[in-house]
Amino acid sequence: MTGIGVEAGAQAARSRALAVLRVRSRALAVAVLPAGAAVILLTGASTGHLVGRGWDAARWAVGVLAVLVLLAAAGVGLVVARARPATSPTVPIPEESAPDLYRMVRDLADRLEVPAPSAIALTPDCDSWLEDRAHSAHGPPPRPAPGRPPGPSHPRTPTPPVLVIGSPFLWWMRVGELRAVLAPVIAGTGPSAHPDIAAARRFVRGLDAAVAVASAPGRCPPVRGLCAAVGWVARLLLRGCREHATQMERGVAAAAAERAQAVDYGLRIVAQEQVGLAYAGWDRLLTRVALPAWRMGRWPSRLDAGVVAALTELSRRDRLAEGFTSRLGERPACDLLEEPGAVDEAASLLAARLFHGGPAKPCTDWAPVDWQAYPEEVVDRTWRVDAARLHRVLDALGVRPSRHPGTPDPGGPTLARVLDHLATGDTAPAGPAHPHEALRQAPAHPTPRAADGDGYSPQGPPPSDDVTRAGGVDGRDMDADGEAEAEPGTDRSVALAARLTAELAREEAHAHRARKGASTAHQGPDSVAWAPGDYGLPPFPLQTHRTARELLADHVTAMVCCAAVDTAGAVPALDWLDGPSLLLGGERAADLAPKVLTLIEDGDPGPLRDWLTAFGIRPEKPVRLV
């Protein structure tokens, strides 16, 4: 390693840390300034120099001001010192559950000549970092492992931070790749051990926590006014030290990166490619596979193992990724854990709570699902729920059941009813004259708004009259200038899509209120952080935006899949890259989407009917709904 580069980065970080501490010293000086003036005035009176009615009035005024300022400063300092700094929700990994992982981290720290992290935790994200949890509110520091000396006891020696590792890295990366990726992160414990840098970080985190405490809702007006004053002071100090704190962290990162240059540098270049690949696979797995399950009240219990399956499938399809499968013969990093299955399940539950919300423990309406049961419990159920919603909307619009001569149950839910309604050549249904009149006549059911106190809306803004969740008017999207942009489609498809949007928004509003009620029941008025025991809403909602036309296409596709399963022997399946899929004769039905869009946009059911006939799917037969 180049000692000059390491020393330069560390020196820059220390100088910026001293600048942050000078901001704290100036604030303290301003707080004691009136007290100093009061001492001077009192000393002058005792020595007979500052006497007279004017000096007496000044002594009283400055003395009262000094007392008030000192009380205010003590209150702000108490809040800053006792406020609980925010921590990332993680899955703790005790040393007895991963001795090989701890041994690898300590060996790496010894090679880098830096203190080893105090503990290890996992996060359901493709990132790794050091997190200081030495605050008293976070509990006592972890006990050293048997046979290891206790940590430093000097009061100015900070406790080493916790190493947070992205759980997808452990399953996709090999042991050598993980060590190379973690080297720059662990090297950051060296500059963090400097007392000035540690003190500056504690001060900044305390100010940030004080702002969060002052912004917490649910307090009476007098307390709210005091909290507003504390928050104003904390924000003022944060603005004063923001630039110095930013440059301090950059200096720490530069020193850590320079120190890690000599440790597995060549392997780190290769490992960085795996970081990008793991991120892409993790994002696709969450949005295409996990999100449909979460919406059904199920959470996949092996998400990290699913990343390996998804990226392996990607390497099979993409010739550019062929070289990645050759790595699978090496030892995976998850072998460093004693019970990787239990850790994967805990990380999967945390991911579900972070990105979707829900209870902290499994229950009847929030149960785990393994990948073997995913097609039956998630894919098939999702299709039938969407098909049931589609027929409820058709009933509300007054669409008559299909009168096909071969229909065994004329009033049952059939695919033919959907095809006949969306076909432009058919007679208009016995319903409202205007295609959006049914939506205007529907009772108002507002969706969650940011004014509810959390700023989270499951699917977007609330529908009102002709304004749908898609953000448009009369089934049209809004462009960047705020003007309505017409979506392709017939009048019937636009009206049906608008009504489906409103129906889905009402269902999600009901679920939102239920989750919020559970959150209020389990969270006190003074809670300002999302804790692992809360039943609250997700801090990072993972909701993909779908336009009204896309929503209608999804529901029609679900109805087609239900008909294929019930009448042609098709089976639901899971595609690791695209999520729910339909298997017809053992082959994935990949050409269904264009035919559904032709029906919706042009009102032409011909291509879809030909496709149904080719696979022996009978649209006139009723399907099973939930």
Image (spheres, rainbow, N blue to C red):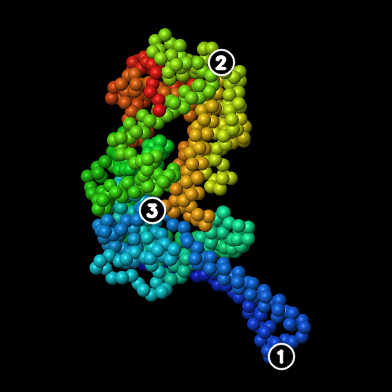
Name the secondary structure under disc 2.
loop
Q: Residue at x 23, y 49 (%)?
A: 331
Disc 2 versus disc 1: nearer the observer: 2
Residue 383 placement: quadrant: top left
Residue 236 shown left or right of residue 357 in the figure: right
For badge 1, the amino acid type reads Gly
As measured in the structure, the alpha-carbon distance from the residue carrying label 3 to the one carrying label 2 is: 56 Å
Neighbour class for label 1 at 10 Å: few (<14), some, many (≥20)?
A: few
Residue 551 shown left or right of residue 345 in the figure: right
**Mark 3 or mark 1, which has the lower sequence index?**
1
Q: Say which residue label 1 marks.
A: 48
For badge 3, the amino acid type reads Thr
Horizontal and vertical percent position of residue 168: 34, 47
As measured in the structure, the alpha-carbon distance from the residue carrying label 2 to the one carrying label 1 is: 101 Å
Give whichever of 276, 614 is nearer the camera.
614
Neighbour class for label 2 at 10 Å: few (<14), some, many (≥20)?
A: few
**Mark 2 or mark 1, which has the lower sequence index?**
1
Residue furthest out toward the left: 329
Name the secondary structure under disc 3.
loop
Residue furthest out toward the bottom: 47
Quarter of the image where the N terminus is located:
bottom left
Q: Say which residue label 2 marks.
A: 430
Q: Which mark is residue 490?
A: none
Q: Say which residue label 3 marks.
A: 90
Q: Is residue 539 above or below residue 567?
A: below
Q: Is residue 431 above or below residue 329?
A: above
Determine whether label 2 and label 1 are within 8 Å by CB.
no
